[in-house]
Amino acid sequence: MWTYTPETHGIKNVTLPGDYAMLTRGQAKGFRLPEGAWMLEYGRGMVPLALPLVLGDVAVSAMNLPTLLKTLRVYGRMAARELLKGKI
């Protein structure tokens, strides 16, 4: 994965497989993944508040309505199940 920040734009910082790339609070970072690569993202906080940001790529960039609806349906079903168990 190639990463860059506004301060290091134009300088390619390579992250190797198995390494992690951390984004600190208040930092912006861009990245490029080579063909066939995948990334696992980790986030903390309230999931409902993060949904617009997380789903922005699916909803706006790709205009992939079936994927957006499926994601919301699965999330809604899982959230309802947890709420019925009394979890908040």
Image: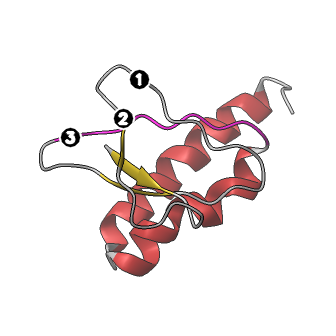
Residue at 49% of width from left, 38% of height from top?
41
**Label number found at residue 37:** 3
Quarter the N terminus occupies: top left
State the predominant SS element of the stretch in magenta.
loop
**Label number found at residue 82:** none
Mark 2–mark 1 CB contact (< 8 Å): yes
Q: Nearer the viewer, mark 2 or mark 3?
A: 2
Give neighbour class at mark 3: few <14, some 14-19, many 20+ (Cα, 10 Å): few
Outermost left residue? 35
Residue 12 location, x and y as percent? 35, 53
**Res 31 → quadrant:** bottom left
User: Which residue occupies the foreground of this view, 5 or 58?
Assistant: 5
Q: Which residue is mark 1?
A: 19
User: Which residue occupies the foreground of this view, 68 or 77?
Assistant: 68
> How far is disc 1 from disc 3 in space, using C-alphas?
14 Å
Q: At label 2, which amino acid type do we have?
A: Thr
Q: At label 1, which amino acid type do we have?
A: Asp
**Res 39 → quadrant:** top left
Residue 65 location, x and y as percent? 36, 74
Which of the two labelled residues, at mark 2 and mark 3, occupies the earlier sequence position? 2
> How far is disc 2 from disc 3 in space, using C-alphas?
12 Å
User: Which span of residues is magenta-colored?
Assistant: 37-45
Q: Can you say whether 43 is above or below 76 in the image?
A: above
Question: SS class of the residue under badge 3?
Answer: loop
Q: Which residue is mark 2?
A: 15
Residue at 27% of width from left, 39% of height from top?
38
**Res 6 → quadrant:** bottom right
Residue at 60% of width from left, 49% of height from top?
76
Q: Can you say whether 39 is above or below 26 in the image?
A: above
